[in-house]
Image (cartoon, grey):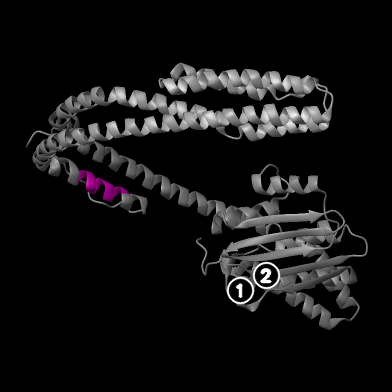
Amino acid sequence: MRKQNTLSEQLRVLLIVAILPLIVMIIALIGMLGNLLHEYSITLQNVTTASELNINFKDNLDLDMYHIVVQSSDNADELPLEEVEKAEDILKRLENTTTQKDNLWRLESMLNLCKRLKECMIDIDQTVLYDARMEKLENNIYIITEIIETYMHEYIYVEVHELGQIQSKISAKMSDSIKVILCVGVFIVVAVILYSMRIIKSIIEPLYKLCRKAEHLGMGDFSVAPILSENADIQKLEDMFNKMAERINALVNKIKEDQKTLRKTEMELLQAQINPHFLYNTFDSIIWLAETGQDEQVVEMTTNLSNFFRNSLSKGKDIISLETEKQQVESYLKIQKVRYGDILEYEIDIPNEILGYEIPKLSLQPLVENAIYHGIKNKRGGGKIKITGEEKAKSIQISVEDNGAGMSDDKLRKLQMKVWNNQSHSGLGLRNVHKRLQLYCGAEGGLEFYSKIGEGTKVIVTLPKQNQLSP
């Protein structure tokens, strides 16, 4: 059996072939271009620093002084002396890095002008007559700021011109460097290609196979055959990868089992939401109707109760059509209508076009029950529940809205936190509906709540638009 060389050993030889010529070339290039780049950097910094002063300096200072003149302010603290001092600071910084004699003279001139500008500003502030203040503004301030602006434009022009000259020098040096790089590069490429042909089978192909194996693993395929390699590192990586795949497979299977258990538990909890009091009250209503001889109403109510439980069980299915869910809610509302009489009205308006989409069962009934017991019952004179459906571009939205008591903003926020963040054991039905919607539909599904005290509450169920939800 051939000896398995490590990846580091093979790469070390490859690096030696490639890196030594590169090091020599880089050192020579750095030494050749270092001074030019340093000079270019300083000049560019000067242009950038000068731009800080040049941008709106004249306009802002002229406008500030005009406002002071017009308002006849006697408060010297309102003078924009800080703007001038800021300009002086910039000019002094430029003096430390500027090498052009003409620009040094301009910087010195602008510093003197700034000093004169502050004197003129103080003089205007101490002048009482408006006409005199305006004359000094126009003949002193405006002229000085214009001269400073002109000098700064000339300064920037000279520095930018110098940048162009430095760039030309760099381009010339780079042209020479490129020729050297090409020669050295050809040598390196030939050497690397020759050596790479020797190690391609021991490194490149196993790595490619390992990548393909990772892709299969990402798609849930854990049955990819082992990869054999002459490279010790890649073989070790392959062995560890296989162990990781085995653990992931075991964890995935465990998660699937846990999710099945979770769904079963949540379904049991949701079915437990069918309040025993609801059954007691329903049977009491049936008995009362029978005693009063209302046989047709007894048959209708018993039929609705039977349909309600039939749809609730749905032959053990977790996912049912929206049409079946609508029938289940309608049966529930007809039963409650007999009990509450005129204090409960309802309307169901779900377009036929969306009835074929699927929804986790018992998603709407807990919302309707919540609307009755926490909305309609708490409002004097009764109220109305309206269930509507709407088709969006990528989703289906079902809203359950009542005009009951509603709730305050604070109470609404608390309800949202309970349902969305599992912060309380109360609101179990709503929280389980929200969790199941997200379990079957992903992050796009779930419940949204809107309410105003005294006006009612609206709950929106969002379902991704797809024919079949992933169980």
Residue at mark 2: 389
Magenta stretch mostly in which secondary structure?
A: helix
Determine the image quadrant of residue 206.
Answer: top left
Element marked by disc 1: helix
Looking at the picture, tell me which residue is in the foreground, 368 or 201: 201
Q: In the drawing, does residue 359 fall left or right of residue 243?
A: right
The residue lying furthest to the bottom in this view is: 296
Q: Is residue 207 magenta?
A: yes
Query: Residue at label 1?
Result: 354
Q: Secondary structure at mark 2?
A: strand
Q: Quadrant of residue 26?
A: top left
- Asked if labels 1 and 2 touch by Cβ distance under 8 angstroms, the answer is yes
Residue type beneath disc 1: Ile
Q: Position of residue 242 (x, y in %)?
A: 28, 43
Q: Residues within 10 Å of mark 2 (few under 14, many from 20)?
A: many
State whether residue 249 appears in this view. Answer: yes
User: Hey, what amino acid is under mark 2?
Assistant: Gly
165 sits to left or right of 65: left
Write the residue at 71% across / 64% down.
399
Identified at 44% across, 19% down, the residue is: 97
Q: Specify start and end residues of the magenta stretch as a single range.
A: 206-214
